[in-house]
Image (cartoon, grey):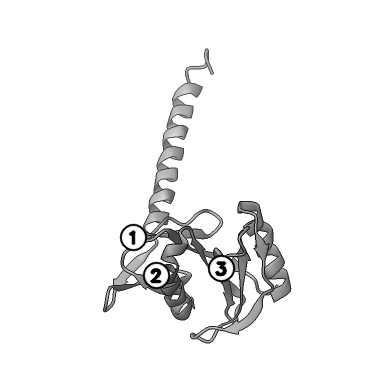
């Protein structure tokens, strides 16, 4: 670019525009969550693709480009997670195998066989756990799918077993109230 004075200002403007677009996209991802206060310290998390309820003290993170989001407790040692997918033609066997591929890449463990479930909101789904080296179900997963084939994966990672009861209460509330939009 040196020696071509007409190119340098153009590239500078192009980089500035690219930076503005990147900031706008990041801001949009941060603001894609609506939090509705309910009774008794519970909030409903609403996004364009799904909603669920959790205790108010949990904080909702940004959605990644691949549709994942972490929800962290401010008082307990654990985290919840969500991930969306289009699974219109996928079988439960296929979704389970694909999920395990990514789950065990993140952290090793022994998966349990999945169980078919129906959520309290009426969605068909599967549930399974990944056991740690002590055979503790540290990570638990529920995948639900609507009639149009949109899937929502819900997960919990219990970092501190002494917080298990509190964390599982939040996870159960999340699973019981999850809706796919």
| Residue 73: quadrant of the picture | bottom left
Mark 1 residue element: loop
Residue at image coords 36%, 58%:
31
Residue at the image position 43 percent from the left and 38 percent from the top:
19
Locate residue 24, reporting x and y percent: 40, 48
- Other residues around mark 1 within 10 Å, as few (<14) / some (14–19) / many (≥20): few
Q: Where is residue 54 in the image (x, y as percent from the top left)?
A: 38, 71
The residue under label 3 is 140
Q: Which of marks 3 and 2 is in front?
A: 2
Element at badge 2?
Answer: helix
Task: Name the N-terminal-most of marks 1 and 3.
Answer: 1
Q: Is 5 in front, or is 117?
A: 117
- Would you say 132 lies left or right of 60 here? right
Q: Which of marks 1 and 2 is nearer the N terminus?
A: 1
> Marks 2 and 3: in contact by CB < 8 Å?
no
Residue of label 1: 75
Q: In the rendering, at what x and y percent does residue 53 appear?
A: 39, 74
**For the residues marked 1 and 3, what is the alpha-carbon distance in whole angstroms?**
20 Å
Q: Circle 3 — which element? A: strand
Q: Distance between the residues labelled 1 and 2?
A: 9 Å
Q: Is residue 144 visible?
A: yes
* Extreme residue toward the front, this view: 134
Does the residue at mark 1 contact the one at mark 2 (Cβ under 8 Å)?
A: yes
User: N-terminal of the two: label 3 or label 2?
Assistant: 3
How far apart, in angstroms, are the residues tagged by discs 3 and 2?
14 Å
Front residue of this view, candidates 105 and 27: 105
Question: Which one is nearer the viewer's eye here, 90 or 166?
Answer: 166
As rendered, which of 12 and 108 lies closer to the eye?
Answer: 108
Per the image, the residue denoted by label 2 is 166
* Residue 4: mark in rendering: none
Residue 118, quarter of the rendered image? bottom right
């Amino acid at each position: 670019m040196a020696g071509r004075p007409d190119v340098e200002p153009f590239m500078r403007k192009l980089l500035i525009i690219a930076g503005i677009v990147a900031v706008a996209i990041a801001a949009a991802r941060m603001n894609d969550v609506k939090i509705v206060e309910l009774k008794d310290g519970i909030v409903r998390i609403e996004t364009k693709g799904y909603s669920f309820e959790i205790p108010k003290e949990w904080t909702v993170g940004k959605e990644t480009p691949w549709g994942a989001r972490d929800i962290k407790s401010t008082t307990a040692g654990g985290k919840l997670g969500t991930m969306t997918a289009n699974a219109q033609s996928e079988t439960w066997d296929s979704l389970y195998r694909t999920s395990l591929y990514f789950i065990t890449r993140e952290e090793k463990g022994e998966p349990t066989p999945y169980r078919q479930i129906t959520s309290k909101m009426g969605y068909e789904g599967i549930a399974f756990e990944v056991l740690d080296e002590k055979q503790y179900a540290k990570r638990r997963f529920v995948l639900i799918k609507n009639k149009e084939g949109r899937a929502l994966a819900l997960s919990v990672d219990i970092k501190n077993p002494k917080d298990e009861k509190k964390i599982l209460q939040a996870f159960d509330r999340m699973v019981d109230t999850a809706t796919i939009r």
